[in-house]
Image: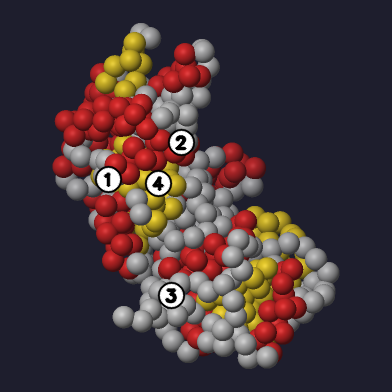
Amino acid sequence: MTAVPGRLVAAPGSAERGVAELLAWLWRLGPVRDGPAPDAVAVGGAAGAAELRALVGERRLAGAVILAGEAGEERDGLPARRVVRGVARLRGAGALDGEHVLLGGGQPAVRSSLGVHAVRDERVLVAGAGPERWGDLAAAWLLPALADFLPGILDRPLVALPPLGCLRLDDAPGTAELQLLDRAKPDERERRRLRAMARALESSGSRLVAAVAARALRDGDVVPIDEVWPASIALIAESVERGLMEPASHGLLHLDPAEHAAGRVAPREFLRLDRDEAGRRLDEALAWMRARLGPARSFIAPAWGYSDGALAAAAERGLTTWMPPRPGPLLDGHLLRETLHDGVPGLIGVRYAPLVRLAEAGLPPTVVFHGRMLDDRLPRLRAARDAVALARLARRRDLERIAALRGVRWVGAAELVERLRAHA
């Protein structure tokens, strides 16, 4: 069978290549080509803007997307660009907080209350965002803009995933690291928090991935985590049985063994392990999970601290392994890419519409919690003096609100991976 030629082009080794590979994977546009083709759209950066415009003018490219995510003067077919910080309010896409690159000329393709974020000149789209912004919600307007631009240039519809997302709770109900830092919470408090999450999941029909370390500390000794947080682990087990939560391995002890032996506290347990030791720790953790919570099919090392040996050991055990956000295919063998940074920077108040827009464009938002509210939520809201959001979140936390969002179905890691494999 003859392979279908890809419809996107990007220079090998360029930063924009990852974005092109993501878009090609996300919307079934075939393998990314290395050189121009008259039926393909190139994805490039500001440095190659003049060349891309020339190729489009010569009909050697069907179109071009130029990712100009830095400030600059008007030159080489690019408008002047400046960086501003603030809240950008976009029609139908919610509000986004952070740094924004605004364009000074051209036909606006994306406009907000701050100014123009992208311009279009027939078959060329210039966007004020680059690969370095991937995972930042402040650039969430980019994917819908590309979804609007590409079908008309390629003369074909995009084939996208249904609007799915994945919620994950890490460090539940606590870790040895938090114990040593004197930040661990009592069992009863954790049980109440998990009970509130379970009620929210049940009422919204959502599922939550609970990433649990198998061991904790008691009087200086390493013990099964359910000896420290028995009621909380029992609540997670009940929620798994009811289909509200899905267990994931968060390692064995959530401590770097070498640092711990030296009297220091560092979470990256799997960062420096060889394959045998990583496999031993995984086997011990997985055996505990099977007995107490049910089988874990995914694994997130503390702080994404993976050695090559740890990745090999996880693959040998058939574990889907969570990786940090980065442009490229969301699923690569057993590696699963998250799509948003922890804490969801860029979010304004309790306005979650950008999450829905991403899901509608075919990108499943992955939202990671370490409690019922997003990471660093209170400091950010206090710095912004957003008393209204603080009052609303006091009544109903981020997790409950996001789980109940209309327009996104929040699934477990197992179903997400199944969907991604079928899509690929």
Circle on res. 30? 3
Q: Report if the CB atoms under discs 4 and 1 are less than 8 Å apart.
A: no
Disc nearest the viewer among 4 and 1 = 1
Residue under numbered circle 4: 322
359 or 159, which lies in front?
Answer: 159
Q: Secondary structure at mark 2?
A: loop
Mark 4 Cα-neighbour bin, 10 Å: few <14, some 14–19, many ≥20: some
Disc nearest the viewer among 2 and 4 = 2
Disc nearest the viewer among 4 and 3 = 3
Instruction: Answer with mark 4 or mark 3, whichever residue precedes in sequence.
Output: 3
Q: Report if the CB atoms under discs 1 and 2 are less than 8 Å apart.
A: no
Mark 1 Cα-neighbour bin, 10 Å: few <14, some 14–19, many ≥20: few
Q: Quadrant of residue 184?
A: top left
Residue under numbered circle 2: 307
Q: Secondary structure at mark 1?
A: loop
Amino acid residing under circle 4: Trp
Instruction: Answer with mark 2 or mark 3, whichever residue precedes in sequence.
Output: 3
**Which residue does the image show at 40% across and 22% down from the upper left?**
176
Mark 3 Cα-neighbour bin, 10 Å: few <14, some 14–19, many ≥20: some
Residue 51 in view: yes
Give how far apart the Cα atoms at labels 1 and 2 are: 17 Å
- In the displayed image of the protein, which residue is found farthest to the top? 219
What percent of the width, then of the height, locates residue 199? 26, 45
Give how far apart the Cα atoms at labels 2 and 3 are: 31 Å
Instruction: Answer with mark 1 or mark 2, whichever residue precedes in sequence.
Output: 2
What percent of the width, then of the height, locates residue 304? 46, 39
**Which residue does the image show at 39% across and 52% down from the upper left?**
336
Q: Secondary structure at mark 3?
A: loop
Q: Quadrant of the N terminus?
A: bottom left
Image height check: is 252 above or below 134? above
Residue under numbered circle 1: 318
Q: Secondary structure at mark 4?
A: strand
